[in-house]
Image (cartoon, coloured by chain):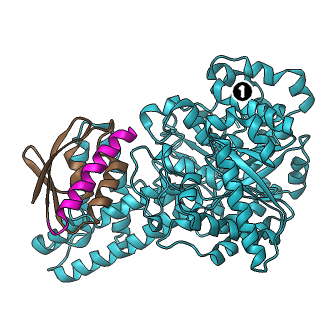
Chain colours: A cyan, B brown
């Protein structure tokens, strides 16, 4: 193979090689609209449009629900916004008007209105508004598809085989509607590491390279490609090389022996999965997670009505049973902040991340909290389980939460249910809790460090605000220093420590966490294989010898820390490339 | 009919998420909601309409609400704009 490696941005780890399927760009698809041959019945056209709107909305509602349960409210909002467009008087309303007044075919009305909206947005100077063009394109495209317009390109994903999906840009709706088990990887020209498609790819454990501008034209004729989603490069494969790769993958595909070997790493660390939906429990087995390190329970509460105690028991038991003999760590309700729950009628706060969120909300609604805790106790009979409380900033809150837990146990026992063992832990995500870890450690069985919020609160950076995104640094010395301090406090008190934020699945940080003696790393299930590979290339004795912890804690900037961590990345890469 | 002046204060203006929030909030009310900026007047329940005004930080718009729940609608929407600013969104 002497083809050039084209450099993009590694957006989701893993390497892949295989045949290419090109997703038609949104502009290409759906523009070939046939001109009407005879007079049009506008009421018929109107009916077609309305049916397409209903169908599109149903599809979007399904995506919204799927994304909400798998990834939370933030990403689900994308689809909520798209649905708003579908009921927008200036969008679909205008399309209807044009069908009536100008006797246009439905497709043409849809395209016209969408094109005008796009032109209008392009004329605005503000980049924020121009970014919305993708949203308009996406919705218009789906609408036209549901109208059954003949596309220039055959848009269908092949009915069999595994493919590398290559696209100019990838919308959330497109990403989610692909059969993910048959997508080898994503290669996308536009977008960055934080684009919706990149986040979705990481969640599903599909390698991805995005932002691939260089080489785009040179690669346009390639029948096959090879890529590394960690390093971010892409290479063209000739037909012959492609055949070779496909023969080889057939024989090597998921060699169970290889997995076991990797599992028996030199580290005594539990690799667990983060899940947000009982349905995700299948991913736990598929990616061989040793239990669930973070079971987000919010999704249960985001519907129109609140879940009953029975419903919650079922949702918890299902996951606990699937994970046994490994432990399932259930996080109590972390709603409020940016996570909405219509059934709870929460007031809009001016600063929701610092407002009535998580445990603070639970204390205000003892029935809500009590119901969840009773359900957890009842489910505890089904297998090994732990509970943890989010957003604790002082010792009193922890004690109060434990009182609620004790009261719930008593009630459940009085009602005649049997209960099992229940480990009790807390999230460390507020800097105050990290500072106080030495005291808190004596009152819990474990700490779970929620790095996303810990970083956000420590660095005073809203991760959703693009303007300050570059200040959100997982490798910031203050953040890693805090994690080290918490771990030491836990070790002194004889309790275990887990990491369940995004940093938990960051292979770059793995050597640091291993050197610290972190007991559990919990991550999106799709990241587990890469973490295993990384750990297989590391050596505990060597980490200690090289005084990694001391050197990192000695750094003054995130860049210095990153430079040290990157040295440890080579072992992992070697492994990833072995099979190719 | 209630007419009120609103100043957009949050840094990135009334784009994507803030606009979604606005339309979701406006949609909960029966009253007719319109926004006027200079010559242009748009339907305050329309996402595209809102986006077309290109409201960025510092933009001043007139809010016109008319209907059975106009007082509540005006209050909620005004609050939304100040909340966005406080959040720094």
Q: In which quarter of the image is residue A311?
A: bottom right
**Residue A579 seen from this side:** no
B70 within the magenta span: yes
Image point (9%, 43%), residue name: B38
Residue A544 in percent (x, y) is at: 88, 25
Residue B64 position (above or below residue A191) = below
**Residue A260 seen from this side:** yes
Image point (68%, 23%), residue name: A561
Q: Is residue A1 left or right of A11 when viewed as pictured?
A: right
Chain under numbered label 1: A
Residue A242 in percent (x, y) is at: 68, 51
Residue B33 in percent (x, y) is at: 17, 60
Which residue is under mark 1? A566
Q: Quadrant of residue A4?
A: top right
Image point (68%, 60%), residue name: A404
Question: What secondary structure do most residues of the magenta stretch adopt?
Answer: helix
Quadrant where the N terminus of chain A sits is top right
Q: Extreme left residue here?
A: B39
Q: Is residue A521 left or right of A102 when viewed as pictured?
A: right
Image point (81%, 23%), residue name: A548
Q: Please, what secondary structure does the residue beneath circle 1 have?
A: helix
Total marks in image: 1
A501 within the magenta span: no
Q: 10 Å neighbourhood of mark 1: few (<14), some, or many (≥20)?
A: few
Residue A253 in percent (x, y) is at: 79, 57
Residue A124 position (above or below residue A554) = below
Give the extent of the magenta segment: B67-89
Residue A150 position (above or below residue A216) = below
Query: Is A308 in front, or is A474?
Result: A308
Query: Is A62 in front, or is A439?
Result: A439
């Amino acid at each position: 193979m002497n083809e050039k490696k084209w450099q993009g941005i590694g957006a989701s780890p893993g390497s892949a090689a295989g045949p290419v399927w090109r997703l038609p760009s949104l502009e290409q698809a759906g523009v070939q609209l046939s001109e009407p041959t005879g007079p049009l019945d506008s009421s018929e056209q109107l009916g077609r449009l309305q049916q397409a709107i209903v169908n599109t909305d149903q599809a979007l509602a399904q995506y919204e629900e799927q994304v909400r349960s798998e990834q939370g409210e933030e990403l689900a909002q994308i689809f909520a916004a798209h649905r708003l467009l579908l009921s927008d008087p200036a969008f679909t309303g205008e399309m209807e008007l044009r069908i009536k007044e100008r006797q246009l075919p439905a497709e043409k009305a849809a395209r016209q209105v969408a094109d005008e909206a796009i032109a209008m947005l392009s004329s605005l100077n503000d980049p924020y508004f121009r970014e919305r063009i993708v949203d308009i394109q996406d919705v218009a495209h789906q609408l036209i598809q549901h109208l059954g317009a003949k596309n220039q390109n055959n848009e269908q994903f092949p009915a069999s085989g595994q493919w590398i999906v290559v696209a100019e840009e990838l919308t959330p709706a497109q990403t989610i509607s692909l059969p993910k088990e048959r997508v080898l990887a994503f290669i996308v020209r536009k977008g960055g590491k934080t684009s919706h498609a990149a986040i979705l790819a990481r969640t599903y454990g599909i390698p991805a390279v995005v932002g691939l501008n260089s080489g785009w034209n040179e690669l346009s004729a390639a029948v096959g490609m090879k890529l590394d989603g960690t390093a971010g490069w892409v290479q063209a494969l000739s037909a012959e090389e492609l055949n070779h790769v496909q023969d080889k993958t057939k024989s090597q595909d998921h060699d169970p022996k290889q997995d076991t070997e990797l599992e028996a790493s030199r580290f005594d660390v539990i690799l667990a999965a983060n899940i947000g939906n009982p349905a995700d429990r299948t991913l736990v087995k598929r990616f061989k997670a040793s239990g669930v390190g973070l079971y987000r329970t919010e999704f249960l509460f985001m519907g129109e009505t609140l879940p009953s105690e029975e419903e919650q028991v079922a949702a918890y038991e299902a996951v606990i049973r699937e994970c046994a003999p490994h432990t399932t760590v259930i996080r109590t309700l972390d709603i409020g902040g940016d996570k909405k729950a219509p059934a709870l009628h929460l007031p809009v706060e001016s600063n929701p991340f610092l407002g009535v969120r998580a445990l603070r909300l639970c204390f205000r609604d003892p029935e809500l909290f009590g119901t969840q805790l009773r359900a957890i106790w009842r489910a505890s009979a089904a297998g090994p389980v732990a509970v943890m409380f989010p957003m604790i900033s002082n010792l009193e809150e922890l004690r109060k939460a434990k009182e609620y837990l004790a009261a719930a146990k008593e009630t459940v026992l009085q009602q005649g249910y049997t209960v099992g063992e229940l480990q009790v832990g807390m999230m460390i995500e507020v800097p105050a809790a990290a500072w106080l870890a030495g005291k808190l450690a004596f009152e819990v069985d474990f700490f779970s460090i929620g790095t996303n919020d810990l970083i956000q609160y420590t660095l005073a950076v809203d991760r959703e605000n693009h303007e300050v995104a570059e200040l959100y640094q997982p490798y910031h010395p203050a953040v890693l220093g805090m994690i080290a301090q918490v771990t030491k406090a836990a070790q002194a008190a004889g309790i275990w420590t887990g990491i369940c934020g995004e940093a938990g699945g960051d292979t770059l940080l793995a050597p640091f966490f291993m050197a610290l003696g972190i007991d559990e790393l919990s991550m999106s299930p799709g990241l587990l294989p890469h973490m295993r590979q990384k750990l297989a290339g590391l050596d505990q004795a060597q980490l200690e010898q090289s005084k990694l912890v001391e050197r990192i804690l000695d750094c003054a900037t995130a860049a210095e820390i990153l430079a040290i961590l990157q040295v440890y990345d080579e072992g992992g890469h070697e492994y990833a490339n072995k099979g190719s | 009919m209630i007419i009120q002046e609103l100043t957009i204060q949050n840094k990135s203006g009334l784009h994507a998420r803030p606009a979604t929030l606005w339309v979701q909030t406006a949609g909960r009310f029966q009253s007719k909601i319109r926004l006027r900026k200079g010559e242009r007047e748009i339907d305050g329940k329309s996402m595209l309409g809102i986006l077309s005004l290109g409201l960025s930080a510092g933009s001043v718009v007139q809010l016109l609400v008319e209907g059975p729940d106009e007082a509540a609608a005006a209050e909620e929407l005004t609050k939304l704009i100040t909340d966005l600013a406080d959040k720094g969104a």
